[in-house]
Amino acid sequence: MTEKMKILIAYDGSEFADVAIENLRSAGLPSEAEVLVMSVADVFVPPAIGEEDMFPPHEPEVVRRAHECAEQKLREAEEMAKRAEELVRGNFPDWQVSHEAVADSPAWALISKADEWKPDLVVMGARGHSVLGGRLILGSVSQRVLYEAKCSVRIARGSRPDVDSPIRILIGVDHSKDSSAAVEAVRNRTWPRGTEVRMLAVVDTVMAITPDPSQPAAMKWIEVGDEENWEAVRQIFEPSAEKLRGGGLDAAVMIRRGNPADEIIDEAETWGAECIFVGAKGTRGIERLLLGSVSSAVAARARCSVEVVRPV
């Protein structure tokens, strides 16, 4: 039996967090999933003081007030997480949904939970607010989770302007392992009929191709600076496009020249993509880096939702 997809949803009660939940309805997610909604109160809960530890033998007023404030913030986080759980259940009645609230630094609480629970996907709104004394998301919280999480992360933005129009998905491809994982992530989702997928390859002067199997450490490149060589690039990605078509998707390969992040963002906006899928690292990524410059820039600047995919 195939294991259910595990999804961790960060929720802070903001408009963007509500959008992130609504946005999941057009994310191609399975009808059954195990979901945890998590809210974090950005406060420190002081340890309780026992009578034997008190000197003088009474709790200082400042400590008592700190406890009361922290406990109130934690109760608010609990209520928000519970409300978000109900929203998720309303949209996905067959999902197994639970909620959790903790008092901690928001980013590290989410990263720690992801390390412990090992979700397939973390979902966050593009920005948050200071309801819990928190910070602006995508600049602190979601950016830190995006960089440090070991799983894929979805940064949700906006809702569908026309529910009757086909869903449009843009995948940034560069023939890297992570790029291939982004294609597979789209292929393995369940999309409505008519969903359109465009695989965008952005070239400069060279592009990596599959290494020689007899020389696994070697990286081969082809010259792609001139447009007459672009058909060779198209053929590199055509097998992946054919797999997407085999899954009922309207898939095509596009090629652009320029800065990859800029071209991906511009194409998504011009074409009206609802979501961009990119690998966490590209062919020129460094293994010690948890997030590449292209995926980082796309996630930060795109006006639509972005999924940064990490291979399983």
Image (cartoon, grey):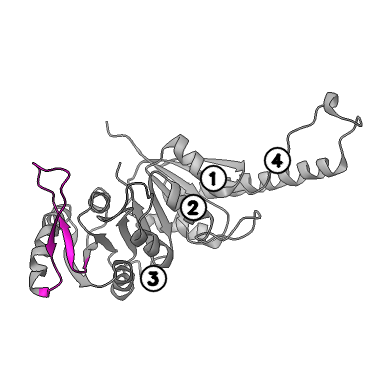
Camera-side mark, 3 or 4 = 4
Question: Dots 1 and 2: beta carbons under 8 Å?
Answer: yes
Task: Identify whether 32 is placed above or below 14.
Answer: above
Q: Which residue is mark 3?
A: 161
Task: Identify whether 164 is placed above or below 148.
Answer: below
Residues drawn in magenta = 202-227
Question: Dots 1 and 4: beta carbons under 8 Å?
Answer: no
Residue 40 in percent (x, y) is at: 59, 47
* Residue 95 colored in magenta in the image: no
The amino acid on which the numbered mark 2 sits, given as a three-letter code, is Arg
User: Gap in Å between the C-alphas at discs 1 and 2?
Assistant: 8 Å
Crowding at dot 3, Cα within 10 Å, few <14 / some 14-19 / many 20+, comes out as few
Q: Earlier in the sequence, mark 1 or mark 2?
A: 1
Q: Nearer the viewer, residue 255 or 37?
A: 255
Residue at x-position 35% and y-position 70%: 162
Task: Identify whether 103 is placed above or below 235.
Answer: above
The amino acid on which the numbered mark 3 sits, given as a three-letter code, is Pro
Q: Which residue is mark 4?
A: 45
